[in-house]
Image (cartoon, rainbow, N blue to C red):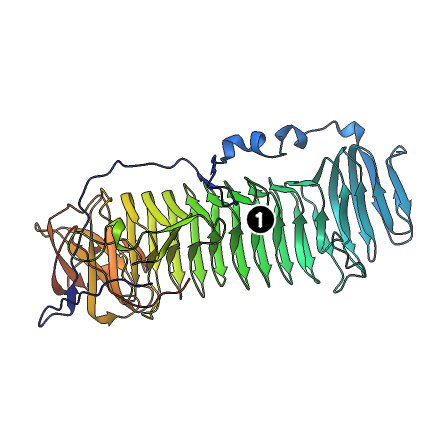
Amino acid sequence: MRSFRTSLSVAAVALAISLAGCSTAATSSTSTGSTGTTGTSTGTTQQAVTAGTIEEDTHYDSDDLTWDAATEVAISLSDGGSKVTSSSSTGVAVDGNTVTISTAGTYRFSGSLSDGQIVVAAGEDTVRIILDGVELGNSSGSPFVVQSADEAIVYLADGSTNTLTDATSYADQGEDAPNAALYSMADLTIAGTGSLTVNGKSNDGIVSKDGLVMAAGKVTVDAVDDGIRGKDYTVLLDGAYQVTAGGDGVKADNETDEGRGWLLVSGGSLTVNAGDDGVKAFNTLTVSGGSVTVAESEEGLEAQHIAITGGEVSVTANDDGVNASGGSSTSTDTGAAAGGMGGPGGGGMGGGETVGDYTVDVSGGTLTINSEGDGLDSNGNATISGGTVVVNGPTNDGNGALDVNGELTVTGGTVAAAGSAGMAVTPATSSTQSGVQLTFSSSLSAGTPVHIVDSAGAVVATFVTTKTSASLVYSSSAITDGATYTVYTGGSADADAGVTTGSISGAEEQGTVTAGEYTQAQGPGRR
């Protein structure tokens, strides 16, 4: 990334104040969902998918989670002795340690198989599988395979504990062969209040080659490669999910079909420790509720379009924290002609970089990023219109807390982005909410409170660093455009990190800054 460097030092103080600005008015926009584009290069607009439209936009139907218990077919699993224990059913076939379901219905499984398999081969029928205390392993492949169905529902019985463990290597390596401990070629729903542990010892944990909806349950996945993977879409409506993955944590990966490859978290809790990306979608990735914690990753959230409209998101990344990239090839190279470059009144542009069909849009909730690479990174534009965004960005000048190829437009919410000073991207002139930019002549150590104080002596903002920081961009409704603020470091804060309240008692005055005046530094960036 390239941008202009303006070095303005203030003698005898530890704060260098950088100037440029948030000025011309623009119409404020509020996002109600993840409105993005399809994964093709046509630039076709894709309508946002929200929790309220899930039953229209996916295979999921809440009615599928209710049934007449009298119609259940009970199946007891045991090595060499699996059998139907309720009234007989023509939809169940037992062949050694393989149990095959071939017709629509509700089937309740209990017991264990040390080396066996549940297979659903039901054509275009809907099949409901209740796991009620099942321990299932397989020595040569996947223990649970949906070969065909209109929809497969895996329901975790109340109070039950269930475990699926696959082989360390699969005998069948064909193109459409299973490659996960729970593998479905059909639309898949996981629900119920019980628990499920999935051990993907060969490759992935849970895979649907169609759509995947996680409606409820306590699900723990430990996988060699990807943890939870849907193709057309992956949806988390409720439940608690703990994912440990050598590859990506949770993803939707359809790269070919228009309007597919999207992911939505609208409730529940998700915690991910990933060797690669934490939560990833080819097309759109939306968090509208619940909590998402990416505790370990290379890149935390990645998609062509990323929208945070609610909920709590916390990301820790070895590279970029939130990264809008990939997807469509539709792009333009705006360069300096798009405005917002350098000098007073500038800011927000990546500096001659290609501005692609990528977006980050935060309109609600909280987003906290701790990254070694870029913090909030869009290869296109970014908008913040609500919620709270806290970035604890890189300590090296080759990356920035904020990195936007196009414009970073701030019209609401609270933004606090701290990190290195070599790549300071700031709000563009299209922003309607003002802010301040601070560049420190010597880096602040982790845990240092930074206070922004108005002319009446009131502390309007306190931010506590979590790592060594050389700069801070702060914007909120408490900042008045054109007003002069005094900056202090030290003193006390009411929280150990992030945006909080505090006192300047015992703090050191560092200098003054004018709201709405930004500048940018310069340094090489990474994509």
User: Which one is in front, 402 or 521?
Assistant: 521
Q: Residue at x 11, y 70 (%)?
A: 13
Q: Residue 311's image quarter?
A: top left
User: Is 257 on the left-hand or right-hand side of 145?
Assistant: left
Q: Answer yes or no: is residue 501 visible.
A: no
Total of numbered circles in the picture?
Answer: 1
Q: What residue type is labelled 1?
A: Glu
> Closest to the observer: 249 or 422?
422
Indicate the position of residue 466 as horizontal and vertical percent values. Answer: 33, 64
Image point (84%, 43%), residue name = 100
The location of residue 216, given as percent across then percent down, is 60, 41
In the displayed structure, 166 sits above or below 120; it is below
User: Seen in the image, is 55 located left or right of residue 69?
Assistant: left
Asked if residue 268 is positioned above or below residue 141 in the image, the reply reads above
Asked whether residue 47 appears in the rendered view, the answer is yes
- Where is the C terminus found, in terms of image quarters? bottom left
- Under tag 1, what secondary structure? loop
Which one is nearer the viewer's eye here, 517 or 1?
A: 1
- Write down the quadrant of residue 62 in the picture: top right
Is 308 situated left or right of 127 in this image?
left
Relative image position of residue 271 (x, y in whole percent): 52, 54
In the drawing, does residue 28 fall left or right of residue 315? left
> Label 1 neighbourhood size at 10 Å, few (<14), some (14-19), many (20+)?
many
Q: Where is residue 514 in the image (x, y as percent from the top left)?
A: 12, 54
Of the 4 image quadrants, the one containing the N terminus is bottom left
The residue carrying mark 1 is: 255
